[in-house]
Amino acid sequence: MLRPKVSLRVAMIVLIVSAIVLYLDHRYAPSPVVFGRPLQQNGMFALIWSQAMGVTTAFASSSSARFVLVGESAPLSLAGDVGYNVRAALDASNGALRNVIIRPGETWSFNASVGPPARVHVRVVAGVPGGGWCDLASRYVQALRPVLPPEAFAFSNHVRTTGIGLLNVADEDAVAIWNIDGQPGSFGGRQDLQITNTTEATLQLVVVEGPSSDQIVVRALQVEW
């Protein structure tokens, strides 16, 4: 009796490798195109797709969840010292800024997500430690402007505070950040960005690759069931 050319073990290895390749393909695609499309009913596919989109596992457990793109920021460069500081902020607190969930009625804080700045290694840009964090915070405002009213945003305006605008940011969206101790709110010398979800839907902010590999954008998703 002839042995089959491909054993069950080899077949399983091929299947696992194929699944990993598909996951990585979705995970690093710069512009996912299924925003607004319901997640597949298959639970495993929903979990894999949610990870590719930066969606939390809690939402992935709901097979009827929809993730609708409602806004996107201008690209932000990751080049130079500013880019170094942007990456440092995005990596702080286990990447809290990369995937933000704001449920109805909740208020989110940029500074609290970053945490105490003493734990984050940054470079000095134009005399400012962490120069670039203002640019990054402004991208969250840009992403959510289409879906939230002006009163949902609380921050010190960069133009009014410093007299300087930010590249590719409208003056009204320019955020001034000064993180002293990782506490939320703008008081005691702190300058924070706080966003309150005044809608009835859960909002998600995800940081993804921009038009080029050395850029990022912030996308705002509305989670629907």
Image: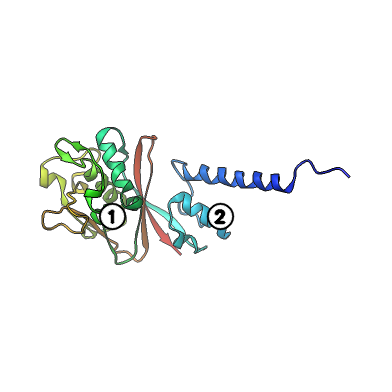
Residue 154 percent location from the top left of the image:
19, 57
Question: Which label belongs to residue 45?
Answer: 2
Q: Which residue is mark 1?
A: 113
Residue placed most toward the observer, 78 or 71: 78
Residue at left offset 51%, top offset 52%:
49
Query: On screen, 15 above or below 80?
Result: below
Report the label total.
2
Question: Which label belongs to residue 137?
Answer: none
Determine whether the residue tagged by mark 2 lies in a helix, strand or loop: helix
Image-based side of 14 in relation to 182, left or right: right
Which quadrant, please, contains the N terminus? top right
Is tag 2's residue or tag 1's residue first in the polypeptide sequence?
2
Determine whether the residue tagged by mark 1 lies in a helix, strand or loop: helix
| Residue 76 lies in quadrant | top left
Residue at mark 2 to residue at mark 1: CA–CA distance: 29 Å
Q: Are marks 2 and 1 in contact (CB under 8 Å)?
A: no
Image-based side of 7 in relation to 102, left or right: right
Amino acid type, callout 1:
Ser
Number of other residues with Cα within 10 Å of mark 2, as a class: few under 14, some 14 to 19, many 20 or more: some
Amino acid type, callout 2:
Phe
Residue 64 percent location from the top left of the image:
51, 63
Number of other residues with Cα within 10 Å of mark 1, as a class: few under 14, some 14 to 19, many 20 or more: many
Query: On screen, 101 above or below 160?
Result: below
Residue that lies at the very extreme toward the front in this rendered image: 119
Q: Nearer the viewer, mark 2 or mark 1?
A: 1
Residue that lies at the very extreme toward the top in this rendered image: 80
Image-based side of 107 in relation to 98, left or right: left
Residue 61 percent location from the top left of the image:
50, 63
